Amino acid sequence: MMTQTKIQIKAEDYQFIKAAHKELNYKTQSEYMRDAIQVQVAKDRMRLRQLKREAAMEMIGKAAYENLFESIEGDDFESR
Protein backbone atom coordinates (compact mmCIF):
# COMPACT_ATOMS: atom_id res chain seq x y z
CA MET A 1 0.00 0.00 0.00
CA MET A 2 1.43 3.35 -1.01
CA THR A 3 1.49 6.26 1.40
CA GLN A 4 1.07 9.70 -0.03
CA THR A 5 3.50 12.31 1.22
CA LYS A 6 4.86 15.67 0.19
CA ILE A 7 8.52 16.21 -0.44
CA GLN A 8 10.58 19.23 -1.35
CA ILE A 9 13.28 19.06 -3.99
CA LYS A 10 15.45 21.60 -5.72
CA ALA A 11 13.92 23.37 -8.70
CA GLU A 12 16.65 22.18 -11.09
CA ASP A 13 16.09 18.57 -9.98
CA TYR A 14 12.37 18.90 -10.59
CA GLN A 15 12.98 20.35 -14.06
CA PHE A 16 15.34 17.46 -14.85
CA ILE A 17 12.79 14.88 -13.70
CA LYS A 18 10.05 16.60 -15.64
CA ALA A 19 12.13 16.60 -18.83
CA ALA A 20 13.81 13.20 -18.53
CA HIS A 21 11.29 10.78 -17.04
CA LYS A 22 9.72 9.89 -20.41
CA GLU A 23 13.12 9.45 -22.09
CA LEU A 24 14.10 7.08 -19.30
CA ASN A 25 10.95 4.99 -19.91
CA TYR A 26 9.06 5.95 -16.75
CA LYS A 27 5.29 6.25 -17.09
CA THR A 28 5.03 9.15 -14.66
CA GLN A 29 7.17 11.50 -12.66
CA SER A 30 5.91 9.75 -9.52
CA GLU A 31 7.25 6.42 -10.74
CA TYR A 32 10.66 8.01 -11.29
CA MET A 33 10.59 9.49 -7.78
CA ARG A 34 9.50 6.16 -6.22
CA ASP A 35 12.36 4.32 -7.89
CA ALA A 36 14.88 6.97 -6.85
CA ILE A 37 13.66 6.84 -3.25
CA GLN A 38 13.71 3.03 -3.18
CA VAL A 39 17.33 2.97 -4.34
CA GLN A 40 18.36 5.48 -1.66
CA VAL A 41 16.41 3.65 1.06
CA ALA A 42 18.06 0.35 0.11
CA LYS A 43 21.52 1.97 0.34
CA ASP A 44 20.67 3.52 3.71
CA ARG A 45 19.39 0.19 5.07
CA MET A 46 22.62 -1.52 4.10
CA ARG A 47 24.66 1.29 5.66
CA LEU A 48 22.67 1.11 8.91
CA ARG A 49 23.05 -2.68 9.04
CA GLN A 50 26.80 -2.28 8.58
CA LEU A 51 26.97 0.32 11.36
CA LYS A 52 25.00 -1.94 13.72
CA ARG A 53 27.24 -4.88 12.81
CA GLU A 54 30.38 -2.85 13.52
CA ALA A 55 28.96 -1.62 16.85
CA ALA A 56 28.11 -5.21 17.84
CA MET A 57 31.62 -6.37 16.99
CA GLU A 58 33.06 -3.56 19.11
CA MET A 59 30.83 -4.58 22.02
CA ILE A 60 31.87 -8.23 21.69
CA GLY A 61 35.52 -7.19 21.81
CA LYS A 62 35.02 -5.08 24.95
CA ALA A 63 32.95 -7.64 26.87
CA ALA A 64 34.63 -9.38 29.77
CA TYR A 65 34.55 -13.14 29.62
CA GLU A 66 34.20 -15.65 32.40
CA ASN A 67 36.85 -18.32 32.67
CA LEU A 68 34.79 -21.50 32.62
CA PHE A 69 37.79 -23.71 33.45
CA GLU A 70 38.84 -21.77 36.55
CA SER A 71 37.58 -24.48 38.94
CA ILE A 72 39.83 -27.16 37.39
CA GLU A 73 42.75 -24.91 36.49
CA GLY A 74 45.26 -26.35 38.97
CA ASP A 75 44.33 -30.01 38.50
CA ASP A 76 46.90 -32.43 37.17
CA PHE A 77 45.22 -34.28 34.33
CA GLU A 78 48.23 -36.47 33.60
CA SER A 79 47.79 -38.44 36.82
CA ARG A 80 44.04 -38.99 36.49
Image: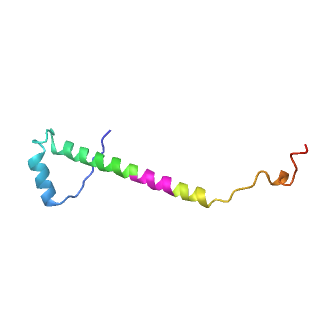
Quadrant holding the N terminus: top left
Q: Position of residue 58 (x, y in %)?
A: 55, 59
Q: Position of residue 6 (x, y in %)?
A: 25, 53
Q: Nearer the viewer, residue 55 or 37?
A: 55
- Secondary structure predominantly adopted by residues drawn in magenta: helix
Q: Nearer the viewer, residue 4 or 61?
A: 61
Please say which color scheme the image uses. Answer: rainbow
Q: Position of residue 54 (x, y in %)?
A: 49, 56
Q: Nearer the viewer, residue 5 or 36?
A: 36
12 sits to left or right of 43: left
Above or below 23: residue 11: below
Kindly give the residue lying farthest to the front in the view shown.
Answer: 78
**Total count of labels:** 0
Residue 14: quadrant of the picture: bottom left
Kindly give the residue lying farthest to the right in the view shown.
Answer: 79
Quadrant holding the C terminus: top right
Q: Position of residue 18 (x, y in %)?
A: 11, 49
Query: Residue at position x 9%, y 42% from top?
Result: 23
Is 52 inside the magenta-drawn segment? yes
Above or below 25: residue 63: below
Query: Residue at position x 48%, y 54% from top?
Result: 52
Q: Which residues are magenta?
A: 47-54
64 sits to left or right of 47: right
Query: Residue at position x 22%, y 58% from top?
Result: 8
44 sits to left or right of 19: right
Query: Residue at position x 13%, y 42% from top?
Result: 24
Is 25 inside the magenta-drawn segment? no
32 sits to left or right of 49: left
